[in-house]
Amino acid sequence: MALLLPKTNFVLAIFLLLLMLSTSKGSLDVHYYHQTCPQAENIIFETVRKASINDPKVPARILRMFFHDCFIRGCDASVLLDSTPGNQAEKDGPPNISLASFYVIEDAKTKLEMACPGTVSCADIIAIAARDVVAMSRGPYWNVLKGRKDGRVSKASETVNLPAPTFNVTQLIQSFAQRGLGLKDLVALSGGHSLGFSHCSSFEARVHNFSSVHDVDPTMNTEFAERLKEKCPKLNRDRNAGEFLDSTASTFDNDYYLRLMAGEGLFGSDQALLTDYRTRWIVESFAKDQGLFFREFTASMVKLGNVGVLENGEVRLKCQAVN
């Protein structure tokens, strides 16, 4: 009988996990604001569109903001909270110092408070804005489930739980699994790196003194590595130096996967997706079929948006502070 106990516990754990996930998803609805604030999505879209015209960096920053919010405490807008004298918030944690464009979410929130006071959560604004920046960048469009509430807790110390650009596939799998996300979600959501730019600090270790045997990461294309060395020399004094995440960094497409196939993944965690047998076949599939990538990306974004949904939180009046 004792031999059956671990299996029983495992089945019970899986059941409870599925129950929690289904409960989170069940609390959200595509038409959540249909009666209370029907213009909500239009207000958010126009705010994000105008900000993106003024600053082309906005789309990548908003998409990254959504990832970083949902990976810590779930999608509760905790990443938007400012630090206080008694607490250092997530946005001031080391991985989030380079996050920007918080003003776009605040601007949308200000307009929503004028149109529908106390109705639309900051967490929903981030989720909708993330969808909009992808669609604006020629990527897919999907219906965002809504009804999230905003959290009241934000701790910089918890940002150590964000997946790092140095992670191998095993570490990535573990990190995503803790959020109820599987292999396809991991590879599809990594495609968010189709947009944006990275500073040298996130990848320079791959081209300088990589190991005791190799100065450059051997999985990296030689010409690509030489280009990165020029942009990020050992004694780099340019704090703005870096590289775009793929060759079409303002267009959301499957070029990211084509770059991986060519050995031009910028982060070690990116290139690892091709070198590991568990994820290589998915990378190859997305590189061959952009439509497949778009379908899997939208499914994974909806899934990520269900992580840690709060039912007993609040709707903040200002996104940078609790009510």
Image (cartoon, rainbow, N blue to C red):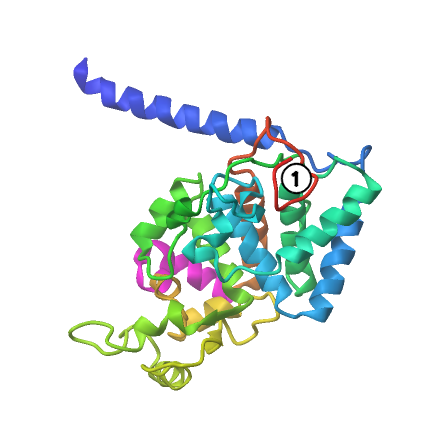
Quadrant in the picture for the C terminus: top right
Q: Main secondary structure of the magenta part?
A: helix
Residue 231 can be seen, yes or no: yes
Q: At label 1, which amino acid type do we have? A: Leu
Q: Is residue 289 above or below residue 219?
A: above
Instruction: Give the quadrant of residue 213.
Output: bottom left
Q: How many labels, in total?
A: 1
Residue 56 picture location, percent across and down? 65, 70
In the image, farthest residue toward the front: 85
Which range is magenta? 273-288
Q: In the drawing, does residue 162 fall left or right of residue 169?
A: right
Q: In the drawing, does residue 321 fall left or right of residue 261?
A: right
Instruction: Give the quadrant of residue 227.
Output: bottom left
User: Residue 280 colored magenta?
Assistant: yes
Quadrant in the picture for the N terminus: top left
Question: Which residue is denoted by mark 1 in the rendering?
Answer: 145
Residue 140 can be seen, yes or no: no
User: Residue 198 colored magenta?
Assistant: no
Graded by Cα atoms within 10 Å as few (under 14), some (14 to 19) or many (20 or more), the crowding at tag 1 reads: many
Residue 271 picture location, percent across and down? 37, 66
Q: 199 or 33, which is in the foreground?
A: 199
Q: Secondary structure at mark 1?
A: loop
Q: In the drawing, does residue 6 fall left or right of residue 150?
A: left
Q: 215 or 298, which is in the foreground?
A: 215
Instruction: Give the quadrant of residue 221.
Output: bottom left
Say which residue appears at 63% left-offset and 48% top-offset.
126
Say which residue appears at 40% left-offset and 81% top-offset.
237
Q: Is residue 67 above or below residue 244?
A: above
Residue 301 picture location, percent across and down? 56, 48
Say which residue appears at 31% left-offset and 59% top-offset.
276
Residue 209 picture location, percent across and down? 23, 76
In the image, farthest residue toward the left: 212
